Structures are given as C-alpha cells and as structure tokens.
C-alpha cells in the first residue's frame, strides 16, 4: 500500500516559503505624502525619485498631495499613519525644524514622530518678481518698500514654509516692512507674482526656473553661495551686498516612527540607487537640485544641524505664525 504522508505533508512544507513571499517588502503600493500642492519643487523631486524607486522595488509609489496649514496637515497624517513601510513623507526643514519655533503647538512631533530614510536633494531659493515688474535688483525692492512701508507684498508657499522664512531673513537684514501673503503652494504664489498681484517672493529654484526661462518671472538673485548652472547670469545675494545669505531648501524621505529598520534599509538602498541613475541625476541638476544620498544616520545628523540653525534664526527674528 502506497503511503500518502509525503503528499499530505508537501503543502505544509511549502508554508514557510509562502509566508516569506507574502512578507517580502514591498508587496503592495507605497504611499508617499507631499505636504504641499502638486507642481511645486517638493512634488517634482518626489515624483522623480519615487518613480525610479518603484522600478527598483517592483511596486507603485503613489504620491499623495496633502497641502494645508503650512504643511501641518500632511505631516500630521504621516505621523499618524501605520509604521509599516507603506506610508512615507517627503519632508523639509520647515516641517522638521523651523516649526518648533514658529508654532506654540503642533499636531505632530518634529523630533520624535519620524525616522529618516535619505536626504533626496537641496535647492536654493530665487528672488523673483513678475516679468513686467519695475524691480530689477533686490535694492529696488528695498527702496520701494522703504518709500511705502507696509504696502509691498511678498508671497510664500504657506505659513512657516521656507519661502516665507527666507523673506523674513531678507526683511530683517534690510529693515523693510512688507506684507506676507501665504498660499497653499509655490505654484499658486508664483502665478500671482507673475500676474503682478503680489510684488515678489523667494521661490525655490526647481519650480521657478521654467517660469523664469519663459519670461513670466524675472529672477533678481539666488540664495546659494554660488551661482546656479541653469541661471548663470543671475547673481547671488552675497554678490549683491547681502553677506551670509546662503540658504537652500532640502527634501528628505521620512517614515513614521516605529517603521522596522530592515524596511528603512530597503528604502534607503532603493533611494540611493535612484539618485545614482544618470537620468535621475541629470534631471535633478537640470532643475538646479543638488542630489543628496547617504545613510539614514547621516541624514539624521544633517537634520539635527539644520534644526538647530533654523530654530535659532526663527527665534532671533521673532517670527511666529500662531
């Protein structure tokens, strides 16, 4: 009589392998929150990077724009999401650092609610006005603002966003009185600057360069230490008489606290590989973004340095948005 035990046991012997296959990460789409409107610099960088990560890991990375309250809405959603590797956020220094000094209360903890995955890249600010604006230098803006205190306006991507903070640093350096007009993202703010409804703003280069090249916006200066390769004719703020004006935005991939270290490691490896792709690097540099990269530990150290810097700047300037 032929025994049936080996046949009966076969499905059970296969279960460990099946369990490993089911647990392999990722095995379903990954959500990546962008806490600002679609079409802005954060959104552009996120979509470029995560498309390549999707190719590497074999699952879609779905970008979800959650703008509102100066990025608080999106960061609160990310902080409360399951720490399972399927909920990520592309964060910024405003959300992870400056907000500690800008707000008396936050719906999330910038220090403890997230774990770092990788620094995606850095991009400088660009002082822009509308294409038909009479202003052609930062000094023109300063002179007009001093002649008409409280009349000129500047736009930003939202309360507490770096686009506001750079302008606040400029205000403090020049002693001008200008009115802040916050928007729900850079695209809306740039649209009104281009139309002349707002006098100026410090945009972030990836989203502003196409409008500058198209003539809708005029660039007056860049906030980096050196000129941009994509706008070589535009001088730096330091060249124009504003020393120590070296400010860049940055984009960092984060996960909710409690995300397993092995998943963080998988995401870090995929993100670094994406940045090493020549096409990704070329497109980032074409948007005036300097690629980041590195380990989660290196990114954590970078965040801590930037947090200390921007909390000090905000407190010294007396900036609040409550």
Image (cartoon, rainbow, N blue to C red):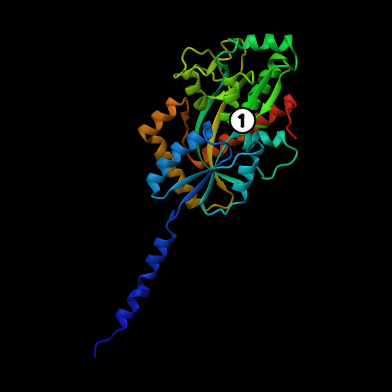
Pick the front one: 317 or 178? 178
Quadrant into which the N terminus falls: bottom left
Indicate the quadrant where residue 11 lies. bottom left
Regarding residue 120, the answer to whether it shows in the image is no
Label 1 Cα crowd, 10 Å radius (few <14 / some 14-19 / many 20+) = many
Residue at the image point whose x is 69% and y is 37% from the top? 100
Regarding residue 231, the answer to whether it shows in the image is yes
**138 lies above or below 211:** above
Q: Secondary structure at mark 1?
A: loop
Pick the front one: 163 or 189? 189
Residue at the image point whose x is 47% and y is 17% from the top? 231
Quadrant into which the C terminus falls: top right
**160 lies above or below 139:** below
Pick the front one: 196 or 321? 196
Q: Is residue 287 left or right of residue 106?
A: left
Picture coordinates of residue 13, whole percent (x, y): 35, 73
Q: Which residue is mark 1?
A: 157
């Amino acid at each position: 009589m032929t025994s049936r035990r080996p046949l009966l046991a076969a499905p059970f012997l296969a279960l460990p392998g099946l369990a490993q296959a089911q647990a392999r990460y990722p095995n379903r789409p990954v959500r990546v929150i962008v806490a600002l409107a679609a079409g802005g610099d954060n959104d552009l960088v996120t979509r470029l990077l995560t498309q390549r990560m999707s190719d590497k890991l074999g699952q879609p990375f779905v970008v979800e724009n959650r703008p509102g309250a100066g990025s608080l809405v999106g960061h609160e959603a990310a902080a409360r999401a399951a720490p399972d590797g399927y909920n990520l956020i592309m964060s910024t220094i405003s959300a992870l650092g400056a907000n500690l000094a800008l707000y008396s209360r936050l719906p999330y903890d910038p220090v403890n609610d997230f774990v770092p995955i990788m620094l995606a890249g850095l991009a400088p600010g660009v002082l822009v006005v509308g294409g038909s604006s009479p202003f052609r230098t930062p000094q023109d803006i300063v002179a007009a603002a001093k002649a008409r205190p409280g009349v000129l306006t500047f736009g930003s991507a939202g309360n507490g966003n770096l686009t506001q903070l750079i302008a606040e640093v400029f205000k403090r350096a020049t002693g001008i009185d200008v009115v802040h007009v916050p928007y729900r993202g850079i695209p809306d703010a740039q649209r009104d600057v281009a139309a002349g409804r707002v006098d100026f703003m410090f945009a972030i280069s990836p989203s502003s360069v196409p409008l500058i090249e198209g003539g809708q916006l005029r660039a007056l200066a860049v906030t980096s230490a050196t000129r941009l390769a994509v706008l070589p004719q535009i001088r730096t703020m330091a060249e124009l008489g504003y020393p120590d004006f070296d400010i860049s935005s940055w984009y960092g991939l984060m996960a909710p606290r409690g995300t397993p270290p092995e998943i963080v490691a998988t995401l870090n490896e995929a993100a670094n590989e994406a940045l090493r792709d020549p096409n990704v690097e070329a497109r980032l540099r074409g948007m005036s973004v300097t690629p980041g990269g590195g380990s989660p530990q290196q990114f954590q150290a970078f965040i801590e340095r930037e947090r200390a810097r921007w909390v000090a700047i905000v407190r010294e300037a007396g900036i609040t948005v409550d």
